[in-house]
């Protein structure tokens, strides 16, 4: 009763999201699926759950081919999926009981009574203690997630796919979920478990497969080694770093542009201090969920400061919002290009000048010539492949869209450039173009670049700050950021004492930084 994926590939235009993936999902086994952002995990889940069809390759169950026209076909074949975006699995306006019984009581019509719905809901989610008559939207995210997971586990699943199922759960709730997952596996269900939390993977999974750049690069069998898994995620060809040359003219880094004192990436993380100087690039890395985006959003004004204080050129800096940050000379390119940085239907020209409208307007009217010149500058600087400044942004490839998103911030000559995952979803050539321009910009600005793939920092960053479960666990010159040290720090298994937190009286939290890696209880789950 094995589900099999055989030579499955998925191509979107010029982008190969998956390349000839072959694996078995065995009954009674919990199979972990691991990979950095853009590795292909979401694409594989979509194929298995019927949301998209493979470009080539086959799915089968007990040797019989499976073809899904949509998610309902997958469900009929016994594939139940709990997606990461939990609100996709609940119906606002309906009660908790109604949401729990969407499948079991569907189509019963006039024969349903409130008492019968409540009884069925209690059977679906025994012991959860949820308010069955409350509107589902009145519950916190963790409770809504419990509803979706309970409903999936109550179905007659042959394959249960859980995509980051504990992302909004407390440690106690996560432990309860783990028990239910193990119980499902003991009853012969195949479980595909996707999580960036290596402690969960270690505890639950019988095997782990690692995806990288759309390829299945490694398979591990319990007992599992966190460090080996992270090393596989980073890539067997992960280069030995060499120190970056100094910026233009060979001059060393200059004044401190940004000082972040006793800040926290997330509320439950440990405080740390970082400094960024003019003429250098600070790389920030860690696994997905380590707190990189949260830290950068605080620097860019997109998220309130958790704790501590920020100094910009020696003056207090606490941005109320991104506009306030921009006015102070700090610009921020967010992680999610499509959702956070692109306006559908707008031209390249409009995207380049969006943050700088006042510079391109006179008496409230936009100066078309000025806008066009700014857009052409970005196109030429980054080598953007586009029909012209007036081309709609959707007409560009993902890599060229990313060049526009990053390039528009350089038009303002910022003091601090903050980039979150600037290389996500772009090809090697686009990465090189973006990296070249960012490195050149560092000659007169300070730059912070975050990525879950530290390989992208070689040739770009001068120093690397490593985060693990919301806490800073090390800061290394790029010449010392070997694959072995990075893997150990990113997996929480390093015994290195973080260099960024000297044990001095001026740093009262330093005595905690050399201790053991934080537990799940110390991880911010929001």
Image (spheres, rainbow, N blue to C red):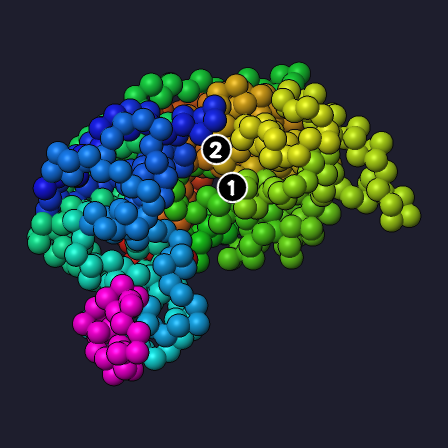
The question of residue 107 being in magenta is answered with yes
Image side of residue 274 versus residue 182, left or right: right
Identify the image quadrant of residue 134.
Answer: bottom left
Identify the image quadrant of residue 108.
Answer: bottom left
Q: Which residues are magenta?
A: 101-125
Image side of residue 146 versus residue 457, left or right: left
Q: Secondary structure at mark 1?
A: loop
Q: Observer-nearest residue: 379 or 48?
A: 48
Q: Residue furthest right?
A: 363
- Specify the quadrant that holds the N terminus: top left
Tags 1 and 2 in contact by the CB under 8 Å rule?
yes
> From what the image shows, is residue 146 above or below residue 404?
below
> From what the image shows, is residue 425 above or below residue 127?
above
Specify whether residue 202 is in view: no
Q: Which residue is mark 1?
A: 335
Specify whether residue 369 is in view: yes
The question of residue 388 being in magenta is answered with no
Q: Residue at x 55, y 50 (%)?
A: 298
Residue 77: give its label.
Answer: none
The CA distance from mark 1 to mark 2 is 8 Å
Tell me where residue 142 appears, x and y as whole percent.
Answer: 35, 64
Tell me where residue 469 appears, x and y as whole percent.
Answer: 36, 48
Q: Which residue is mark 2?
A: 424
Tell me where residue 361 appears, x and y as whole percent.
Answer: 85, 43
Which sits earlier in the primary sequence, circle 1 or circle 2?
Answer: 1
Tell me where residue 482 appears, x and y as whole percent.
Answer: 36, 24
């Amino acid at each position: 009763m094995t589900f099999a994926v055989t030579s499955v590939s998925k191509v979107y235009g010029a982008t190969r999201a998956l390349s000839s993936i072959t694996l078995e999902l065995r009954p009674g086994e919990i199979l972990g699926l691991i990979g950095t952002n853009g590795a292909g995990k979401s694409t594989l889940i979509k194929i298995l759950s019927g949301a998209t069809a493979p470009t080539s390759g086959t799915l089968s169950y007990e040797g019989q081919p499976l073809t899904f026209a949509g998610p309902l076909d997958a469900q009929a074949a016994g594939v139940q999926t709990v997606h990461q975006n939990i609100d996709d699995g609940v119906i606002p306006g309906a009660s908790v009981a109604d949401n729990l019984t969407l499948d079991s009581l569907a189509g019963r019509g006039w024969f349903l009574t409130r008492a019968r719905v409540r009884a069925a809901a209690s059977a679906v989610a025994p012991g959860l203690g949820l308010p069955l008559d409350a509107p589902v939207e009145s519950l916190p995210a963790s409770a809504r997630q419990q509803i979706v997971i309970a409903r999936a586990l109550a179905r007659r699943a042959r394959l249960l796919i859980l995509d980051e199922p504990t992302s909004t759960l407390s440690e106690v709730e996560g432990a309860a979920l783990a028990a239910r997952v193990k119980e499902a596996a003991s009853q012969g269900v195949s479980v595909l478990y996707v999580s960036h939390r290596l402690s969960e993977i270690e505890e639950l999974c019988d095997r782990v497969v690692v995806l990288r750049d759309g390829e299945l690069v490694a398979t591990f069998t319990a007992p599992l080694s966190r460090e080996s898994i992270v090393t596989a995620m980073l890539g067997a060809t992960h280069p030995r770093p060499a120190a970056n040359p100094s910026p233009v003219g060979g001059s060393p880094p200059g004044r401190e542009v940004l000082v972040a004192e006793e800040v926290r990436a997330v509320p439950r993380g440990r405080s740390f201090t970082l400094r960024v100087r003019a003429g250098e690039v600070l790389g920030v890395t860690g696994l997905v969920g380590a707190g990189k985006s949260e830290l950068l959003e605080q620097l860019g004004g997109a998220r309130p400061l958790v704790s501590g204080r920020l100094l910009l050129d020696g003056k207090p800096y606490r941005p109320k919002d991104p506009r306030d940050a921009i006015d102070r000379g700090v610009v921020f390119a967010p992680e999610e290009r499509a959702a956070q940085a692109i306006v559908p239907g707008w031209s390249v020209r409009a995207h380049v000048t969006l943050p700088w409208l006042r510079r391109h307007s006179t008496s409230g009217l936009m100066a078309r010539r000025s806008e066009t010149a700014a857009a052409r500058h970005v196109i030429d600087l980054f080598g953007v492949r586009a029909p012209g400044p007036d081309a709609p942004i959707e007409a560009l490839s993902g890599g060229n869209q990313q060049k526009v998103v990053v390039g528009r911030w350089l038009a303002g000559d910022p003091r601090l450039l903050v980039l979150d995952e600037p290389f996500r979803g772009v090809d090697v050539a686009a990465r090189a173009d973006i990296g070249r321009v960012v490195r050149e910009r560092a000659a007169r600005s300070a730059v912070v670049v975050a990525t879950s793939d530290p390989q992208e920092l070689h040739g770009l960053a001068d120093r690397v700050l490593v985060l693990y479960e919301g806490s800073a666990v090390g800061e290394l010159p790029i010449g010392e950021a070997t694959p072995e040290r990075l893997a150990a720090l990113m997996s929480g298994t390093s015994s290195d004492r973080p260099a960024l937190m000297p044990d001095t009286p001026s740093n009262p939290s330093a005595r905690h930084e050399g201790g053991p890696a934080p537990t799940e209880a110390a991880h911010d789950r929001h």
